[in-house]
Every structure is written in structure tokens, then in C-alpha cells.
Amino acid sequence: MRPSRDIGLALLHAGVVLCQVRRLAISIDSTDIKSGTPLDGFVSYSIEFASFPDFAGNKSSPNTFSDNLLNNIGYLQGDKPYIRVGGNTQDFAIYNANLTVALNGTVNVTRSPDYPTTIDIGPSFFESYSTWPNVKFSHGFNMGGNNDPRVQDTLTQTAELACMALGTDKLYVWEYGNEPDLFATNAQWPVRPSNWNESDYVNEWLDGTAVIKSVIQKNCPDLASINAYKYMAPSLAGVANHLKAPLAWADGLDNTQNIEYFSSHNYISGANTPGVTLQGTLMNHTRTRLSVEAHVDEYNTINPGAGVSHIMGETNSLYNQGRPGLSNSFGAALWGIDFALYCAALSIRRVHMHMGTNYRYASWQPVETTRATRGTKAPYYGNIAVAAFLGNLRIAPRPNRPPPPDRQRHRGRLCCRSPTAATASTGVQLFRRRGTTTARIQRLYANGSDAITGITWDGWSYNYELDEGRPVRLANVTVGETVQVTNGTLNITVPDSQAVLVTLGGMDETLNRPSGPARRGRSRNRGI
Ligand SMILES: *[C@@H]1O[C@H](CO)[C@@H](O)[C@H](O)[C@H]1NC(C)=O
Ligand SMILES: *[C@@H]1O[C@H](CO)[C@@H](O)[C@H](O)[C@H]1NC(C)=O
Ligand SMILES: *[C@@H]1O[C@H](CO)[C@@H](O)[C@H](O)[C@H]1NC(C)=O
Ligand SMILES: *[C@@H]1O[C@H](CO)[C@@H](O)[C@H](O)[C@H]1NC(C)=O
Ligand SMILES: *[C@@H]1O[C@H](CO)[C@@H](O)[C@H](O)[C@H]1NC(C)=O
Ligand SMILES: *[C@@H]1O[C@H](CO)[C@@H](O)[C@H](O)[C@H]1NC(C)=O
Ligand SMILES: *[C@@H]1O[C@H](CO)[C@@H](O)[C@H](O)[C@H]1NC(C)=O
Ligand SMILES: *[C@@H]1O[C@H](CO)[C@@H](O)[C@H](O)[C@H]1NC(C)=O
Ligand SMILES: *[C@@H]1O[C@H](CO)[C@@H](O)[C@H](O)[C@H]1NC(C)=O
Ligand SMILES: *[C@@H]1O[C@H](CO)[C@@H](O)[C@H](O)[C@H]1NC(C)=O
């Protein structure tokens, strides 16, 4: 068991495009509260396999910009993000021992303009697992095979290299195959016959993972124990595709009981789907709610048991790498907050935001390319806000000191209630909290939901051009706001397109300190 944490109140406010202030009284009581128990490292990332060398660099040239951004999240939530290395390109990667570069990818624009679909990786690919201190990874093995006969050799070769590169310090789980529910139906690169079904998938998965295990037993025996040898699976693209997770489970996917995370993938819609808009699609809580709940229903149908945590192993706004002007905007950052906190409230216990080099929805662009400027992007600020909201997830409730009565009610719970209407609020009625007289206000600010620059969290910028992603406090943003709580009610002004974190209680500890990322706040009962 990893420590979980109690969170009192969440009120997410995703507004509309311009800063028009309206009055809205929002009353929240304990019946509105949904409970969740986020894992450590709740805000995590999934990095496209072929982009991993760009994001992480290598031993002689580590990507410290990425590491700075991971540290910022780590300071807020107590652990650096977990990194899943995978995605579509994991199922294209073929090992080539003679390759002198980390990865040699060939782009076929018919298949995708955004990532290579023919890929060789060399021994130095695995150096990228050594560049970020205190980060745990999952390595995604190639199951799809790309119709390449070298895939079986690749599995044994990469299992050895990955286990040696990762070891017990850096590995958290393995993954075998990305989105196998699309293997038979992908229009551009079908890699299985159309009658390939759940039973076939399970047989292949059990065979492949047995091969991986035998390689690990031989080369990395300390990773072969029952506690160390674990997977995330089945990593399906959706709940209604060619393979269904409940059938795969019924067919024995977890027969060897080595699945630690039931991993779902989710996108709210597609980059090229007609009718997609910022306000109607991403900044639409109903849409987000339905999207998340479908996965919760699937997990509950399977009911894999308490030992198998539900996570979003890969997720972001719009599939096909996002749409410019939407997925890279502040509105997408607000969507990311709504989405992640709703997941947390429904006990999807960790959320890996997916990204790759040049991807429109990426939280940051790790390197300079002809298609995108290196830099911190709007969605990252949403990730920061989520980490700030959850606070230090390593701090478990103290067993010997019962909390004061008004906190006890919310102990061990995480609540997330978003108003169904996307409008601004000025009055928030809180459930009564004796002894709470002051609340601290922190804002995620930008000039409108369509902004792609100029975003700050509580006055902090994490932009590359300021200090390579390290936090920089800007002088021109208001910080240190507090409001009085009177008879369970507090009034705050929230312009549309802003997220606000309200921290109740524990004020002595947090109010007098700089709210910078080095803070390891103990305060609980936060709302956003
Ligand atoms: C690697 O190079 C050696 C020596 O030139 C050669 O025998 C071998 O076939 C090459 N392997 C691959 C995978 O290209
Ligand atoms: C390490 O990264 C640098 C910068 O991208 C690159 O020039 C170098 O070739 C890489 N080294 C290896 C062994 O891949
Ligand atoms: C990369 O792959 C392309 C296409 O297969 C090939 O022409 C090129 O020589 C390869 N480059 C390296 C460094 O192996
Ligand atoms: C690119 O992909 C398309 C679709 O899979 C395929 O028909 C075509 O042969 C590929 N082109 C090359 C040069 O491999
Ligand atoms: C998959 O197909 C095989 C052979 O056609 C059949 O025996 C099996 O029951 C099918 N499995 C599922 C889950 O439909
Ligand atoms: C929000 O999403 C729901 C569910 O997809 C949809 O019915 C509704 O029309 C959307 N609202 C707007 C304003 O587009
Ligand atoms: C904020 O956005 C509005 C509307 O797009 C624009 O007119 C204004 O100049 C922007 N202000 C700043 C400070 O960027
Ligand atoms: C605040 O300061 C930053 C950094 O100096 C600057 O880039 C930004 O434009 C300023 N914002 C406003 C609204 O003046
Ligand atoms: C909050 O604002 C409302 C409406 O303006 C007002 O009636 C109420 O007294 C205010 N409450 C507090 C605690 O200031
Ligand atoms: C405080 O709130 C309670 C319950 O809503 C109400 O009955 C009471 O009159 C309020 N007291 C004051 C001083 O506003």
C-alpha cells in the first residue's frame, strides 16, 4: 500500500473565453463529495516511445529542462511524476545492436506525420533511463511487431537491456503492447488478422510476458520476485473497440497475477473530429465526466480486486497529437485540471498525461525542432495546479492524532465537484468548518482560455526562457491573497477561465511561507 491522503473540498471552475465576471452562489455540502484515494505521483506522464530520447536526453547530454519541470511537480505532490515510456511507437521499435544513435525513425506521412512508424533502437536508447534522478519508469515492449520478423529477438534483447538499465531503483512496472484493441483494425497498419480476438490476445500476452520473465530471471534476478515483476495492462485505446477488457480479463489476462495497474487510455475527442471546440468539447464538464465514467464502469465490471489499481496509463485532450489552438491553449490546461481531479475523485489513482516531440497537447516541447520551439506549454500549468491541489501525497493521515471534528468527516476522502455550468462564481458556500476563519487563495492565471503564453500559477512561471523551467516568481501577478470565512461562507471572485485553489485550515503553516515549489505544505482541505 502506498500512502493516500485526505482532501476536503474541490471546486473546479472552468470558465468561458473572456474575463466576464458574474455572480453565482455555489453551495457544497458533504453529499456532493466523491471519494478517491490517489496514489503517490498522481500527476504522471506518458512519453511517446520514439520521443523518449528527446525528452530525457542521454548520459552525455541529459535533458535538464525536462528534469526541472519534473522537479516542480515533485515538490508539490511529494514525488516526481512516474514516467510511462510507450505509445504507438513502442510497437514499432526493433532492436539493432549496431545502431550508433539511440533511435533511427522513418516517418511515413501516410501513416502519421507526427512520429516515425519504422523504428530501430540501439543500445544507447536505454541511456535515457539514467538522466533524471529519482524518477521511476515503465518500459513498453513491442507486442504489435509491425509485421517485422525480428520482433521475437527484439523482445529478448530489449528485456535484458531494459532490466539492466532500470534495476530496482528506476523500474516500477513493465508494459507489453500498446492499444492492442487497434491491432486488427488500424486502417494504416493492421498487424493482426481481423478475427484476432481477446483469447488470442491473452495467449500472446501470457507467452510474451513469460519470455520477458525468463530473460529477467537470468539477467536481473532482483527484478524477478513476485513483488518486483509487475505490469500495467491492458492499455486499450477505448472501451468499445475490437477487444474488450472484461473479455480479456475473463480469458485469463491476469492469471499469473502480475498486473499491478489496470491501465486505461482516454482522449476526449480527436484532433480532426468535426465539431470539436474548446468550450463545447474540452471545457465541458459533462463531456469529461462521461469520458471518465465509461472507464470506471469498465473497471467495476471487471472488478479485478484491491491489488489492481486503476490508472490512466495514457491520456490527453484530443487524439492524433492534439489540435493547434485548442490542445495547446489555456483552456486545455483547465480541461486537464477538470479531467485529472475527476479521475482522482473516482479512484483512478494516477494519471499519465501523454506527450511526444512536436505534439500539440504536450505539456512541454523538450527540444528545438523545425516544427516547434522548445518550451513549457499551457497544459503543464494545468498539471502544476493539479499537483498543488493534491498537495504532498506522501503525507498519510497521522494515526495517533485524530483530526479536529470538522475535518474528521472528510478524512480519507477526496472530493471533486465541478459545476455543470461553465460560468464564473463569486460566492461559495462551504460546509461548515468550525475554527476556520481564513482561506488562502492561489490562482492559475492566463489572459483568457485561448491564451497559449503568459500563464502563471500563484505568480510562478516555469517557462523555459526565464530559467529553463525552474520556478520564477513574477513581480506583476498578485499573490498572497486571503479571504475571511464567515459562518461557513467565503466570497471569492473568479473570472471566467481561471482556476482557483482555496486552502482552508492549516493556515498557520502555509500562510506565512513562500508558496514556492520548495514548500512541502501539510495543509489539507483544499478546493480548486
Ligand atoms: C551488426 O554488425 C555485424 C558486424 O558487421 C554484423 O555481422 C551483424 O549482422 C550486424 N547486425 C545487425 C542487426 O545489423
Ligand atoms: C547523446 O545526445 C547527444 C545530443 O542529442 C547526441 O549528439 C549524441 O549522439 C547522443 N549520444 C548517443 C550515444 O546517442
Ligand atoms: C536509418 O534508417 C534509414 C531507413 O531505413 C536508413 O536509410 C539509414 O541508413 C538509417 N540510419 C542509421 C544511422 O542507421
Ligand atoms: C507508407 O504507409 C502506407 C500506408 O500503410 C503504405 O501503403 C506505404 O507503402 C508506406 N510507404 C513507404 C515508403 O513505406
Ligand atoms: C476467439 O476465437 C476462438 C477461435 O475462433 C474461439 O475459440 C474463442 O472463444 C474466441 N474468444 C472470444 C473471447 O471470443
Ligand atoms: C457538452 O457535452 C455533452 C456531452 O457530450 C453534450 O451533450 C453537450 O451538448 C456539450 N455542451 C456544449 C455546450 O457543447
Ligand atoms: C488579453 O486578451 C485580449 C483579448 O484577446 C486582448 O485584447 C488583450 O490585449 C490581452 N491582454 C494582454 C495583457 O495580453
Ligand atoms: C509579467 O512579467 C512577465 C515577465 O517579465 C512578462 O513576460 C509578462 O508580459 C508580464 N505580464 C503582464 C500582464 O504585464
Ligand atoms: C458574500 O457575498 C454575498 C453577495 O454579495 C453577500 O450576501 C454575503 O454576505 C457575502 N458573504 C461574506 C462572507 O462576505
Ligand atoms: C449561520 O448559518 C446558519 C445556517 O445557514 C444560519 O442559521 C445562521 O443564521 C447564520 N448565522 C449568521 C450570523 O449569519
Image (cartoon, helix red, strand yellow):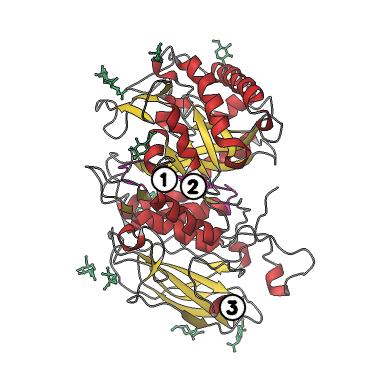
Seen at 70% across and 35% down, the residue is: 227
The CA distance from mark 3 to mark 2 is: 34 Å
Q: Quadrant of residue 250?
A: top right
Amino acid type assigned to the residue bearing label 1 in the image: Pro
Do the CB atoms of the residues marked 2 and 1 lie less than 8 Å apart?
Answer: yes
- The image shows residue 528, relative to residue 268, as above or below, that is below
* Residue 3 locus on image (x, y percent): 67, 54
CA distance separating discs 2 and 1: 8 Å
The magenta segment = 345-362
The residue identified by callout 1 is 62
Q: What residue type is disc 2 on? A: Trp
Q: Which residue is mark 3?
A: 507
Is 223 drawn above or below residue 337 in the view shown?
above
Please tell me which of labels 2 and 1 falls first in the chain: 1
455 magenta-colored: no
Q: Count all numbered tags in the image, as a single digit.
A: 3
Sequence-first tag of 3 and 1: 1
**Residue 403: where, in percent of width, then height?**
73, 71
Q: Nearer the viewer, residue 183 or 101?
A: 101
